[in-house]
Amino acid sequence: MPELHMGDILALLLNGPNPDNARAIAVYKELGFVPAGPPQNTQWALILPMITKA
């Protein structure tokens, strides 16, 4: 991931709802997010990585 500095414009947004939470995933899809890979275990929880352009 590139290093961000003050003044940089955020071009992408990342999000990671639980893959079993169909309701949250549907909301994020309505907001323009799309899956960005398979579900992943993180140190916090199982997530479905999702991304959108800002």
Image (cartoon, rainbow, N blue to C red):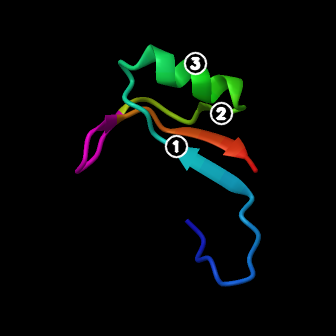
Report the amino acid beneath label 1. Answer: Asn
Do tag 2 and tag 1 residues touch (Cβ < 8 Å)?
yes
Quadrant of residue 3 in the image? bottom right
Q: Upstream in the sequence, badge 2 or badge 1?
A: 1
- Per the rendering, the mark at residue 37 is none
Q: Magenta segment range?
A: 40-46
Element carrying mark 1: strand
Residue farthest to the top, as pictured? 22
Report the amino acid beneath label 3. Answer: Ala
Report the amino acid beneath label 2. Answer: Phe
Do tag 3 and tag 2 residues touch (Cβ < 8 Å)?
no
3 or 2: mark nearer the eye: 3
Q: Upstream in the sequence, badge 1 or badge 3?
A: 1
Q: Of 40 and 53, which appears nearest the observer?
A: 53
Give percent across and percent down for residue 36: 56, 36
- Per the rendering, the mark at residue 15 is 1
- Mark 3 → mark 2, Cα distance in angstroms: 9 Å
Label 3 neighbourhood size at 10 Å, few (<14), some (14-19), many (20+)? Answer: few
The answer to whether residue 53 is left or right of residue 29 is: right
